[in-house]
Image: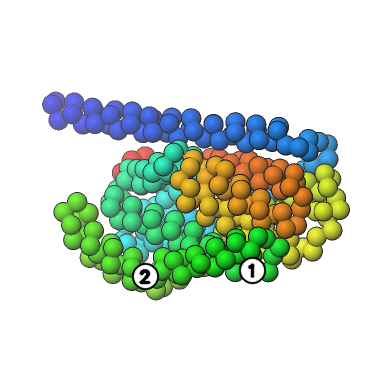
Amino acid sequence: MLVDRVRSRRVWASLALRLVILTLALFFFGLAIRRAGLELSKSEVPLDWKSVRWSYWVLSVVFGALALIPPCLAWQSILRDFGQSVHWANSMYAYFLGHFGKYVPGKAMAVILRVGELHRHGVMVRPAIVSVFIETLTCIATGAILGAVLIQSMAVPRWMQLSALAGIPMAFLVLWPRPFRWIVGRIARSRIGSMSASVVQAIDGPLMGRTVAWSLLGWLFQGTSLWFVLQSLGGLHAESVIGLTVWHSWLVCIASMSLGALAGFLSMLPGGALARELASIWILLSIVPEPIALIATVVVRITSIIAEVSMIALSKWIQYRHGVWKSA
């Protein structure tokens, strides 16, 4: 009787904590949407909704959703390499749910949401946390190198080109498995971070190489999403947007998304607010006027939010469809 009562209290306490965390994430998520709407309304060029090419905008949302899948697959592979057994539908939902957390100041909530959801299904907390950091840092470092290489042939400020080049050695250091192994090994031997030695041994070249490959694919999809946003806004400034070479404008969009994400990540602001947009706009200015660049960065943020919510809903539906949504 007493055991059942204690167990019931733990279940209710766990549910209450999850609701508080999710409510907090949703609150800041709502603020991000509101901020995007305000920025759009203050644009120097009023957005004429009749001039928007909605078919291109829909494609932007589709590719924004597709861009989330490669890093999710990379993370699932890391979990398997760490010996963590979890149904793919549960890890998929945990990954997409974690995107809510990046809108909360400090971004720690992204880790809490993702790891907390996995722990409900029997995944060990410490290996899960390590997997999140490896996937996230690898994705950001891959984007930093990709963007740094691409902007060298673009009409962007010279200081930006040099700054991007200066960051490449640090990015390569992040992608080198030995530093990760050393750091995780030290943590694993400590009392607080005690983990199996197999987790440390799993951090090797193939794991990092596979994660980099998935990350590259994700950035290509991200850039394509922004490219479709520019095409959807073609009616606002046709001579600037439509007249661009497809290949060049696509590469500019990839660099804009990857380096913008890097700036947002380093800023530690909710959702990378301001820092992400500034970096993206500077790069987009090489192909479109400032008002169009501003509108495009705000619109692509909105499409990204819609894509994230769509993938959260889809992954939750898949969980129910497979009957694996209940706690282990």
CB atoms of marks 1 and 2 within 8 Å: no
Residue appearing at x 22%, y 60% in the figure: 188
Residue appearing at x 28%, y 63% in the figure: 183
Measure the alpha-carbon separation of dots 1 and 2.
27 Å
Lower sequence index among marks 1 and 2: 1
**Place of residue 169 in the rendered image (x, y in percent of width and height, measured from the top left):** 46, 70
Which amino acid lies under the numbered mark 2 shown in the image of this protein? Pro
Query: Label 2, on which residue?
Result: 177
Q: Is mark 1 on a helix, strand or loop?
A: helix
Instruction: Relative to 28, say whether 67 is above or below.
Output: below
Q: What is the crowding at mark 2: few (fewer than 14 residues within 10 Å), some, or many (at least 20)?
A: some
**Place of residue 1 in the rendered image (x, y in percent of width and height, measured from the top left):** 14, 25
**Place of residue 68 in the rendered image (x, y in percent of width and height, measured from the top left):** 54, 53
**Place of residue 8 in the rendered image (x, y in percent of width and height, measured from the top left):** 24, 28
The answer to whether any part of residue 111 appears in the image is: yes
Q: Which quadrant of the view contains residue 147?
A: bottom right
Q: Give the mark toward the camera: 1 or 2.
A: 1
Which amino acid lies under the numbered mark 1 shown in the image of this protein? Gln
Instruction: Relative to 69, say whether 45 is above or below.
Output: above
Q: Nearer the viewer, residue 165 or 48?
A: 165
Q: Which of 13 and 49 is in front in this view?
A: 49
Residue appearing at x 49%, y 33% in the figure: 28
Q: What is the crowding at mark 1: few (fewer than 14 residues within 10 Å), some, or many (at least 20)?
A: some
Q: In which quarter of the image is the C terminus?
A: top left
Left or right of 149? Residue 141 is left
Task: Give the residue furthest to the right.
Answer: 239
Query: Label 1, on which residue?
Result: 152
Looking at the rendered structure, which numbered label has been put on residue 143? none
